[in-house]
């Protein structure tokens, strides 16, 4: 929590204003932030200086791991975060590749589970990584990347947290996640949870201890219409201690994640927080 608040304060104190053509809203911006999460000691990085909707963040991650490509699929598992980008983003609405209501196109999990090869076959990046890790193999390339510049025009948004690298040291699994663009008041609240859960979950299904998750962010920003709430409300609050995350121990394989796991297989213990803050969302 301390590192989150320090990043917010750094943006407020040292950020530079950058115009953003896509959303039409300028952002106070810093470059480069390194966060880390202690998964080994179950310090769940939920924001405590406002209410955090952690189940929606976990549902979003489950949708990525399943290769979902429609906002309807995300809604059906308890996550509304893709409604606006699938249905209100003018560039995407005018894109001839959009297949209709709720279509997100070839984003995130579509690339992670079905990267298109030149011969027409597909590569399941996630299954390869899980298989290797299960067999104790780290080939120094246990990478899942959603970033496919050749297919950007086939999706509603370029992935923000775009690459996840797993590393095995003895019986301990580590994760390094890379993010090119980060909406610190809204998106980061979700992304911190997702880095933590991705490591905890993959460690559980591959039979390893979880170590640390490292989260590397390039462009970290606060949109202009979020700044007053961040500076004058959220940053004035004292954080509470981190809660703990309990994951259903019956989750044992990638197939479990694909078939029956829901957001209710994840439970938070000891969460204390300040009141909700509703930040504006820029599409
Ligand atoms: N401008 C922008 N910021 C983002 O963080 C973002 C995008 N766009 N586009 C793609 C995804 C969608 N994400 C989102 C979208 C909405 C919320 C959001 O509204 N969160 C609220 C309530 C969540 C709920 O009730 O489930 C919050 O207070 O955290 C969070 C992340 C993250 N990404
Ligand atoms: O997981 C996510 C997804 C998106 N974001 C934020 C970062 C930016 O504010 C927008 C994406 O806009 P671009 O113009 O494509 O950079 O969404 C996030 O923080 N986390």
Image (tube, rainbow, N blue to C red):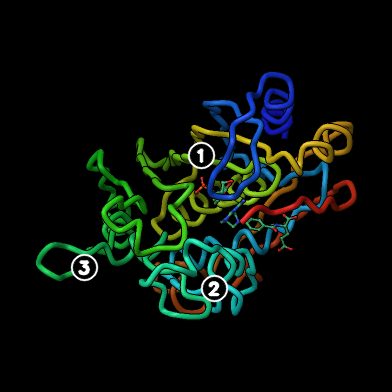
User: Which is nearer the eye, 72 or 216?
Assistant: 72
Circle 3 crowding by C-alpha within 10 Å: few under 14, some 14–19, many from 20: few
Residue ID at (29%, 48%): 136
Circle 1 crowding by C-alpha within 10 Å: few under 14, some 14–19, many from 20: many
Q: Quadrant of the N terminus?
A: top right
Q: Quadrant of the C terminus?
A: bottom right
Q: Which of the 4 image quarters holds residue 242?
A: top right
Q: Identify the residue under disc 3.
A: 122
Going by the image, does 98 lie left or right of 185?
Answer: left
Q: Are marks 1 and 3 in contact (CB under 8 Å)?
A: no
Seen in the picture, residue 5 relative to 70 is either above or below; the reply is above
Q: Dot 2: what SS?
A: helix
Residue ID at (30%, 50%): 149
Total numbered labels: 3
User: Which is nearer the eye, 196 or 223?
Assistant: 223
Specify which label sits upstream in the sequence, 3 or 2: 2
Asked if ligand 2 lies within 8 A of label 1, the reply is no
Going by the image, does 185 lie left or right of 127?
Answer: right
Seen in the picture, residue 30 relative to 190 is either above or below; the reply is above
Query: Which dot, 1 or 2, sits closer to the camera?
Result: 2
Circle 2 crowding by C-alpha within 10 Å: few under 14, some 14–19, many from 20: many
Q: Identify the residue under disc 1.
A: 213
Q: Which of the 4 image quarters holds residue 258?
A: bottom left
Q: Which mark is residue 71?
A: 2
- Outermost residue toward the top? 14
Q: Whole-Å distance between the Cαs marked 1 and 2?
A: 28 Å
Q: Which of the 4 image quarters holds residue 25?
A: top right
């Amino acid at each position: 929590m301390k590192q989150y608040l320090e990043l917010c304060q750094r943006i407020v104190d040292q950020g530079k204003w950058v115009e953003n053509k896509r959303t039409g809203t300028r952002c106070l911006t810093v470059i480069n932030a390194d966060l880390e999460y202690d998964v080994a000691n179950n310090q769940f990085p939920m924001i405590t200086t406002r209410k955090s909707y952690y189940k929606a963040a976990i549902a979003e991650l489950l949708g990525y791991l399943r290769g979902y490509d429609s906002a309807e699929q995300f809604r059906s598992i308890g996550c509304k975060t893709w409604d606006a980008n699938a249905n209100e983003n003018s560039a995407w609405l005018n894109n001839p590749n959009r297949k209709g209501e709720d279509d997100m196109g070839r984003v995130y999990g579509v690339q992670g589970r079905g990267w298109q090869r030149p011969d027409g076959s597909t590569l399941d990046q996630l299954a390869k990584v899980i298989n290797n890790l299960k067999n104790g193999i780290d080939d120094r390339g246990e990478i899942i990347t959603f970033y496919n510049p050749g297919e950007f025009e086939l999706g509603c948004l370029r992935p923000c947290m775009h690459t996840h690298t797993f590393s095995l040291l003895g019986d301990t699994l580590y994760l390094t996640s890379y993010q090119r663009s980060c909406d610190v008041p809204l998106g980061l609240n979700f992304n911190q949870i997702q880095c933590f859960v991705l490591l905890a979950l993959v460690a559980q299904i591959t039979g390893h201890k979880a170590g640390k998750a490292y989260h590397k962010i390039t462009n970290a920003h606060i949109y202009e219409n979020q700044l007053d709430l961040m500076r004058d409300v959220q940053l004035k609050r004292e954080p509470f201690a981190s809660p703990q995350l309990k994951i259903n121990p019956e989750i044992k394989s990638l197939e479990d994640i694909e078939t029956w796991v829901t957001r209710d297989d994840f439970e938070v213990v000891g969460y204390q927080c300040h009141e909700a803050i509703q930040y504006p969302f820029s599409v």
